[in-house]
Amino acid sequence: MTEQDWVATWTELRRIYDHRVAEVRDQQSRVGSILTANGLVLAFAAVRPALPGILGLLQAQALALLAAAILFGLLALWPRIQLGTPTFLDPTRVNQYPDANAVARGLATDLKVELEQQEHVKVINRRRQLIRVQLICIVAAAVLLAVVAFASLRP
């Protein structure tokens, strides 16, 4: 392969790497937004006086679901990716190669190894599952709170 081929390979691998990092960052932002909305709903639901009987039980279940959703959100945010400078981003490595072709080949190889070893895809999939469970808890709690609100309106 020529130097241009290695540079093109490195550029494409770097694009994939940056995309994965951005996707993890976007997921963290999404989880944070859901946690904020969940906290607001929980705050409004918690200040409502407890109702007697079955309505009080439904209200308590809704509060428990909202609390569980917060726990799932925190689990989704729990750090699971090891931090460190990937070898392909280490500027001192560039000076270890004899020529530009060797630099391009070495950087592309290092980046390929980094992509194969990184846990970003596993973390993204785990977070997706936790976000789904979090949203299911919030929706179920909202349904219960709506039932309680409508049932408490009748005379």
Image (spheres, helix red, strand yellow):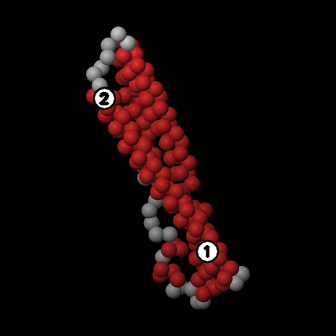
Please identify the quadrant where the C terminus is shown.
top left
Does 44 sit above or below residue 97?
above
Mark 2 residue crowding within 10 angstroms, few (<14) / some (14–19) / many (20+)? some
Residue in the image at 34% along x and 38% along y: 40
**Mark 1 to mark 2: distance in Å?**
53 Å
In the displayed structure image, the side of residue 112 where residue 26 appears, left or right: left
Residue nearest the viewer, comparing 92 with 40:
40
Q: Is residue 147 above or below residue 72?
A: above
Residue 106 seen in this snapshot: yes
Report the amino acid beneath label 2.
Answer: Ala
Q: Which of labels 1 and 2 is toward the front?
A: 2
The location of residue 110, given as percent across then percent down, is 58, 72
Label 1: which secondary element: helix
Quadrant that contains the N terminus: bottom right
> Where is residue 59 drawn, in percent x and y?
37, 22
Residue drawn 40% across the image and 25% down it: 145
- Which residue type does callout 1 highlight? Trp
Which residue is outermost to the top?
155
Of the two numbered discs 1 and 2 on the same chain, state the one appearing first in sequence. Answer: 1
Looking at the image, residue 16 lies above or below residue 100: above
**In the displayed structure, does residue 133 sit left or right of residue 57?**
right
Crowd band around label 1 with a 10 angstrom C-alpha radius: few (<14), some (14–19), many (20+) = many
Residue at the image point whose x is 60% and y is 78% from the top? 106
Residue 109 can be seen, yes or no: no
- State the residue in front, 50 or 10: 50
Numbered label attached to residue 10: 1
Q: Which mark is residue 46?
A: 2
